[in-house]
Image (cartoon, coloured by chain):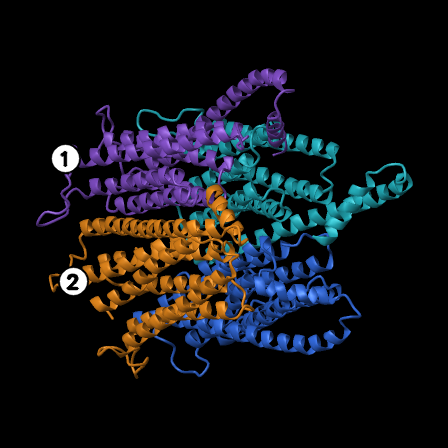
Chain colours: A cyan, B purple, C blue, D orange
């Protein structure tokens, strides 16, 4: 959908997941007494829901792209030419993100599926989006090309980061990096919408001005900054919350300490955070 | 051979190996009680045959490129110009894949040859194919260039994946990734044949239409999707089969258990799959 | 600031940090009895000051870019066009380096913040500088473009090196590499100033001469060489100094040896340096 | 030196080192009882000589480039323009390889210098050669550009390989890869000389023919193949020789076995080669 909504929709999806992941991974990092069997059970459940929501978002995206009034309605080819290829390309993009979510669900449902396949598919979905965008903007005005090309930077970062996560799973630095990139990816989609299809109905930007291109480049950097700050705030909120909870439960623990032996793992955790 | 067969032949080779590898690696992953001396012996045999078949395919390819009616018949230069350079380039491509298969055989025949050399040569064969294709399509119509360039994505993925396998051998995620890429590489060769040399004798595609290029890009993504699905089906088939076999033999084992001590490895395996 | 000072200022910042890092990391490498609790305490303090100085430099840079007589004075847009975008871009660059310094401080102040985030932010700051420079020089004379593009090589090296350091912390080879690259980055900023805005008031260089471009390329290599030599000299100075100190204290130690047991770590260190 | 000799000289240097390294690393791989103190002593000596020869070659190269009759004789600038920049660029290239050799010597002479710095400098020398070549061939005929650009592939491979060796030292696969790339780099320099400055005095090649470019691309692949074969032959020669020697000495050992205890390392080695 070459309009404001067509960019706001994926933008919102990415933004929601960026913020959600920054919370999820911060929380898990702060609760690293992962040997806790019950906790692991919940994390597994959360990962399955996480994947499921991504499948759901992908289905919404595909349906929206296909069945908006000016969409292709599942027709790909009439007698002369391809129909609404741009919508079909967006569907393909959603399809791969949906597939990635689906594999995530499978990975945590069936232990026989090797861990890492979920990250591999997520990485592939990013590459596919990159390939589509790269050839997407051919023959368009300069500013349009440039503003879409900048998406490739966050994509490239995300693909590299996710690919490394195949081998280095549960690395908080990489996970927060991914969350930031996905957040910036989301807000940048919104920015594209605002620049190319101003919802206020104002005049579109001058697509050939070199100054506009220079500003957009800088604006992209500011989006990255904003994403870093959002993730940092989420991380510190979770940090504060978990520490307060720990102190609260810790005081209860002290009372029970002499009765149970699970305070060892608590102590081990504290050491862990100190050392690392 | 700039015709349909010249693309269907390598396409079939890649496709066969993509499917075969997805089966082979899934099977080995499900039978990871690799300390089993007898099993290792069989795997080694299979690897040698695997390499041998690749050498055989490469020889077929080279002979076909050289001795088709309009081939160069081993002549490289006449008094004015180079003869049928495109066929010679394809031969070079086959030659490197043949060499890679040959080194695979040697690696598993002679234990003195360091493991990893086979992956290095496979990676090199991919780079060589990439270099040849990259300069191959100079001065050709836009669609022709684009459709060949897309091969570079699967190649790049395969080269990176195989290069990592030098250091991270027997990683099932990488192996399934490689199998998917080789499968997509194979089906894409078929697609090139259908687009540039329609075997039905219909009219060739409009090589300059921007819409065709956009469709082809999207079509490439669908081939990747198909490859992922093929590999996923193969993996789950093997999974199901091996689990059924295990359960079948497992019941026998239970009977013998008290007599033999090799059930430990079986238990270790089960733990292994659970944990990982 | 498109003048000599605008390049000398960041050049000096990078140069100072290149030299300082080559000294800091050499010193820590020579004092690797890091189990020493007191030493670690000092190193932590030094890292915090290191980050703080970078924040301070970034603030100076931003203020200078904003409030020089021909700067934007915090105005970004008047009714027609963007104001002084180049100064705003430089501010953005400083902002990210400042952020990186700030995260460095936080990482060493609060143990809950995972190590590696500081390197990730430093790497990101490099990428942001690279993106800004890459689009910065569009539509400028050839020599101007080329001389700015060469900065991308040191940046790319620095980004890759810092990114690896997320996973391979405290690797002296990477740290010295980073110090050299930052030094070369700094001297090259000075070189850009001298070439594009000769402070002697002499005529600017011919911006279209191919020979000038060839010389500048070679000159960049010489800057790299100079940076390597500077870092090598600093390393050997620190080496000599620390060895002399060790020998001096070592003789005292011999006297005390029988009384204390901390000479073990000393011996372990010596073994360590020999083996590695 | 833009003539045949100017390409044959560096070509020979690279070729000699490619062959020498394939022998050296094969030999060390076959004698991996590296705990042997005496052997290590010899290896260290060999590495120092290896570095020394590279310094020597670099000095020859620099002197040749400077003091050939049409060379710059150390003059860089006359009143109008730069003098013989191409010779100066070649000197810079030699200089970095010389520096790399020098650091190699230092690394093995002084144990305080961290291992890995030698590989880092070698990698840097490759990047510098790449940067110089990349801008070297601007504004030249198409074939000339292409034939020089192909050097960048062996260079890129060598740089990546050497960079990995900083972290994965003494990996035989990487070492043989490096040896092959250096060999191919050397033979390709000879090929450039033969194509651009035919020593037989025959006519130069048609620099604009697309067929020539296609042939040259393929020819480059054949050089890679030749390099792989040369390294493979050297490896198998060393293999055969060392195994024969071992068997020869092994029989003696059997006699002495009961007297000495160093046969353990021998046995460990045999296990090692089998397992790996």
Residue B21 visible (yes or no): yes
Which residue occupies 49% across, 21% down? B237
Location of residue A96 in the rendering, given as x and y in whole percent from the top left corner = 49, 33
Label 2: how many residues lie within 10 Å, few (<14), some (14-19) or many (20+)?
some
Q: Chain of mark 1?
A: B
Contact (Cβ within 8 Å) of mark 2 with mark 1: no
**Is residue B2 in view?**
no
Q: Which mark is residue D198?
A: 2
Please name the residue that numbered disc 1 is placed on: B70
The quarter of the image holding the C terminus of chain B is top right
Mark 1 burial class by Cα count in 10 Å: few <14, some 14-19, many 20+: few
Between the residue at mark 2 and the residue at mark 1, the CA separation in whole angstroms equals 32 Å
Position of C234 relative to A122 (above/below): below
State the SS at label 2.
loop
Horizontal and vertical percent for residue A106? 58, 28
Q: Nearer the viewer, residue C48 or B22?
A: B22
Give the position of the N terminus of chain B as an image quadrant: top left
Camera-nearest residue between D103 and A44: D103
Direction from residue D104 to residue D138 in the image, left or right = left
User: What percent of the width, then of the height, locates residue C234?
Assistant: 56, 75
Return the chain for callout 2.
Answer: D
* Quadrant assignment, res B7: top left
User: Would you place residue C153 above or below residue B93 in this image?
Assistant: below
D11 with respect to C118 (left or right): left
Query: Which of B76 and C181 lies nearest the eye of the viewer?
Result: B76
Q: Which mark is residue C144?
A: none
Q: Give the total of numbered labels.
A: 2
Residue D91, placed above or below residue B183: below
Q: Quick check: do tags 2 and 1 share a chain?
A: no
Q: Secondary structure at mark 1?
A: loop
Q: Which residue is found at the position 54% from the left and 33% from the top? A: B35
Q: Residue furthest left?
A: B79
């Amino acid at each position: 959908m070459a309009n404001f909504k067509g960019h706001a929709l994926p933008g919102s999806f990415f933004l929601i997941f960026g913020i959600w992941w920054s919370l999820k991974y911060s929380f898990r990092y702060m609760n690293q007494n992962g040997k806790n069997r019950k906790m692991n059970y919940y994390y597994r459940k959360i990962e399955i829901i996480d994947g499921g929501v991504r499948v759901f978002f992908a289905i919404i995206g595909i349906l929206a792209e296909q069945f908006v009034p000016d969409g292709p309605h599942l027709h790909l080819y009439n007698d002369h030419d391809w129909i609404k290829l741009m919508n079909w390309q967006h569907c393909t993009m959603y399809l791969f993100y949906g597939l990635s979510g689906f594999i995530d669900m499978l990975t945590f449902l069936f232990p026989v599926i090797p861990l890492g396949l979920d990250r591999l598919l997520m990485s592939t979905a990013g590459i596919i989006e990159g390939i589509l965008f790269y050839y997407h903007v051919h023959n368009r005005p300069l500013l349009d090309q440039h503003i879409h090309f900048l998406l490739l930077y966050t994509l490239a970062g995300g693909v590299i980061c996710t690919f490394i996560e195949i081998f280095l799973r549960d690395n908080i630095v990489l996970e927060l990096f991914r969350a930031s990139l996905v957040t910036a990816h989301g807000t940048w989609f919104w920015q594209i919408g605002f620049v190319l299809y101003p919802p206020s109905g104002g005049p579109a930007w001058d697509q050939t001005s070199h100054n506009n291109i220079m500003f957009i480049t800088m604006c992209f950097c500011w989006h990255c900054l904003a994403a870093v700050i959002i993730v940092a705030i989420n991380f510190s909120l979770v940090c504060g919350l978990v520490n307060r909870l720990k102190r609260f439960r810790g005081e209860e623990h002290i009372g029970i300490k002499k009765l149970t032996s699970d305070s060892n793992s608590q102590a081990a955790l504290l050491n862990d955070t100190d050392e690392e």
